[in-house]
Structures are given as structure tokens and as C-alpha cells.
Image (tube, rainbow, N blue to C red):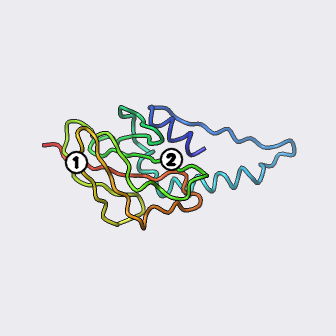
Amino acid sequence: IVHNLIKIVSRGGNYLLNIAPGPNGDWDPAAYQRLKEIGSWISKNGEGIYGSHAVPPYSTENIYFTQNREENTMYAFVLNEESSIDLPATINIPLKEGGKLQKISIAGSSEKISWKKIGKMIEIKIPKTLRKIQQENYATLVKLEYVYL
């Protein structure tokens, strides 16, 4: 569900979940559990979802992009697959044109992220301490802050 949400928002859409009661009028307990897990993920990563809008190129491989209303922050969601236990050591993200990249951070961490510009791409080195994928972390949010001169 989180992966679908990210994919839809990155293309400028809205995602509506239809949760209806069963024949006896109660919700299935699994629905409550899913909503709790989605809410937990959104509480940590919602900045890249709420009030954001699509930004080309929308996605590359398993990384999806949004940006804030002021267009000075781009968000890159790295979708975490169930079979993977670690984030890659480096990820490559297209450089947003028109601004100067000032800072890169990972949601929920204050650890310094090193990066370098290679042509029209940004190579981001994920620190070893942040590579371990935590359970119920369906996607990792990388925040790229730009300054316009």
C-alpha cells in the first residue's frame, strides 16, 4: 500500500483506500493493523507526501520523486523490497535543474550524508549505520534541499 501511495503521489495523483466493514458490520482486524502500519510510516515520512507534487523524471528504477510547494526541496523515496535487508551503499539521483543543491538528509536521521555531483546526477553515499532496513520501513526518504540564487 505504501509503495502504491508513493508511486501515485510521485505522478501527481491521490490515493484512496476503500476499507469497508465485513458482513457482520465489523472491520477485519487486518485492516486495523494495515492502517496502523501506514500511519506509523506516514508520521515519519509524510513531509514528502503531504502538500507535495510531481517532479520530472517522476522515478528512476525503484526511486520515486516529489517536491514541496516552494519547489526548493525534492524528496526521493527509495522503495525497500521485502527480500532486501540493506539499502545500497550508493544511490544515484538526477540533479534538479535551476538550483544549487545545499543539503541532503535521510528522514529520521541527523547523520551527515556525503554526496557528489557527477554530470547531471548526484551520487549519494548511504552511511553504513543507515543501510540496515528496519521492519515496517517500506521506503526510505531522502531529502534534497536546494537554494535558488
Which picture quadrant has residue 99?
A: top left
Q: Residue at x 35, y 41 (%)?
A: 67
Viewer-proximal residue among 66 and 85: 85
Report the number of numbered marks.
2
Q: Which residue bears the numbered disc 1?
A: 101
Q: Which residue bears the numbered disc 2?
A: 79
Quadrant location of the N terminus? top right
Q: Position of residue 84 (x, y in %)?
A: 56, 54
94 is higher (above) or lower (below) than 83: above
Residue type, numbered disc 1: Leu
Viewer-proximal residue among 115 and 70: 115
Q: CA distance from mark 2 to mark 1?
A: 23 Å
Q: Position of residue 149 (x, y in %)?
A: 12, 43
Other-residue count near label 1 (Cα within 10 Å), few / some / many at <14 / 14–19 / ≥20: some
CB atoms of marks 2 and 1 within 8 Å? no
Q: Residue at x 55, y 58 (%)?
A: 85
